[in-house]
Amino acid sequence: MIWVEGARPRTLPAAVTPVVVGSGLAIGDGATRWVPAALALVVALALQIGVNYANDYSDGIRGTDAQRVGPFRLVGSGAASPSSVRAAALAALGTAVLAGLVLAALTSWWLVAVGAACLAAAWTYTGGSKPYGYRALGELSVFVFFGLVAVTGTYYAHTGQITGVAVLASVPVGMLACALLVVNNLRDVPTDAVAGKRTLAVVLGDRRTRLLAATLLIVPFAVAGLLALTRTWALLAVLALPLAMRPLRQIRAGASGRELIPTLRDTGRLQLAFGVLVAVGLAAG
């Protein structure tokens, strides 16, 4: 189904992983509330799907996807009208709003402000008059919202507090989410440059973007080592290291264009496996 493909299911590990990690830490700390956690997952998934549709719509009407080499796009391919894709984006974001309001009612109303920031970031990534995704700020936003905010927010939904360990646990999650975007933008450098979309990959150039991607794939394992200083079983994350080898080899070998689509898939698998292993380790203490 074109709408499922247009939602880009391969990007969904970026939404699931921080909720899994935040919940794992809460289990390890003996403070869990599963209804708020489930709502946090709904919010994360709805925001991810919403931003994917919004990106499809905004890039499509700007013509950025006219020479698309990556995964299927609804507007750019002509498979769906811009108005229908915009409606799908608004429906997904509306779902996030509803789940977020219930979550705030069950935990704290200050989450409404956090949710408003998430919504603004989702829409203005490629939408609006000055989209920040066109100004090399996409990776920073992904690190903040799919790392720091999502992990600590999930932990807060369980426990009603934010700890230093929760913040540290959010770092590798955010870095691997950034790795997904860097690989995606590395693939699209030629077409983005022509379309005037100045992603971080366009600004850095090929060599430095590949170095950044490799760094984002490896450093999370070092952060897991730091987590292990207080949560020994967090070292389980090293079991995911073999999954990092294939995308690293592809990046170092100079894979480009469509050759990077499997790299994007492999990076998503790495992120999910890393998150699950860290979560199990944090839950074990």
Image: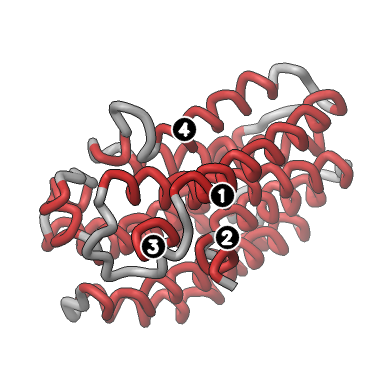
Query: Can you give x and y, in whole percent of width and height, for residue 183 in the image?
Result: 31, 63
**Marks 1 and 3, how far apart in space?**
22 Å
Give the residue pinned by disc 2: 12
Above or below for 195 versus 281: above
Q: Nearer the viewer, mark 3 or mark 4?
A: 3
Above or below for 137 versus 197: above
- Choose the circle earlier in sequence order: 1 or 2: 2
**Residue 193 appears left or right of 280:** left
**Marks 3 and 4, how far apart in space?**
26 Å
Asked where in the image residue 184 lies, by quadrant, the reply is bottom left
Give the residue pinned by disc 4: 121
**Marks 2 and 3, how far apart in space?**
24 Å
State the quadrant of the C terminus.
bottom right
State the quadrant of the N terminus.
bottom right
Query: Can you give x and y, in whole percent of width and height, for residue 148 in the image?
Result: 53, 38
Q: Are marks 1 and 2 in contact (CB under 8 Å)?
A: yes
- Choose the circle earlier in sequence order: 2 or 3: 2
Give the residue pinned by disc 1: 48
Q: Which mark is residue 78?
A: 3
